[in-house]
Amino acid sequence: MGRLLAIDYGTKRTGIAVTDPLKIIPTGLATVRTFQLMEYLKQYFQKERVECVIVGLPRQMNNKLSENAEHVMLFVKQFKKSFPDIPVEFYDERFTSVIAQKSMIESGMKKKDRQNKAIVDEISATIILQGYMESRAYKNKEI
């Protein structure tokens, strides 16, 4: 049984979240500089079995892909070349940064900490993973 891993890809930093081995609880794993992302993932996959990678897909309010989507697609293409045995799924990441900021405020995090974009990226990846897991559970109940 493998974990699920979510990626909130950015051109400078990338947030990563992962589930426990039973795929019950999503947790922020790290924020890494994007130029180090593939090496980080390679090392992580050597230690942990990952069943599927969920990548946040940036969309605009009109449901069209945002300008950052091109960078995400290039990353996924590179990922699939490097890790052909790990399936990749996309999840709509609209509002994840807003939700991350709101959850940081509600948790009582200090303003200085909330301005740390690395924390926001990691929380956003966790929100992507949580949303993916909830949508998958909902789809399984419909069947």
Image: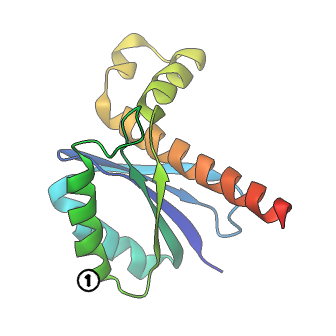
User: Number of labelled discs?
Assistant: 1
Q: Nearer the viewer, residue 105 or 96?
A: 96
Q: Nearer the viewer, residue 84 or 39?
A: 84
The quadrant in which the C terminus is found is bottom right
Q: Residue at x 69, y 60 (%)?
A: 136
Q: Secondary structure at mark 1?
A: helix
The quadrant in which the N terminus is found is bottom right
In the picture as drawn, the residue positioned furthest to the bottom comes out as 85
Up/down of 119 relative to 42, above or below: above
Residue 10 in percent (x, y) is at: 25, 46
Q: Residue at x 51, y 47 (%)?
A: 128
Which residue is identified by label 1?
Answer: 81
Q: Residue at x 30, y 68 (%)?
A: 76
Up/down of 12 relative to 70, above or below: above
Residue 137 in percent (x, y) is at: 75, 58
Residue 34 in percent (x, y) is at: 20, 54
Colour mapping used in the image: rainbow
Q: Residue at x 21, y 43 (%)?
A: 67
Residue 27 in percent (x, y) is at: 56, 49
Q: Is residue 42 left or right of residue 52?
A: left
Q: Nearer the viewer, residue 51 or 111?
A: 51
Q: Disc 1 marks which amino acid?
A: Lys
Q: Nearer the viewer, residue 53 or 139?
A: 139
Q: Residues within 10 Å of mark 1 (few under 14, many from 20)?
A: few
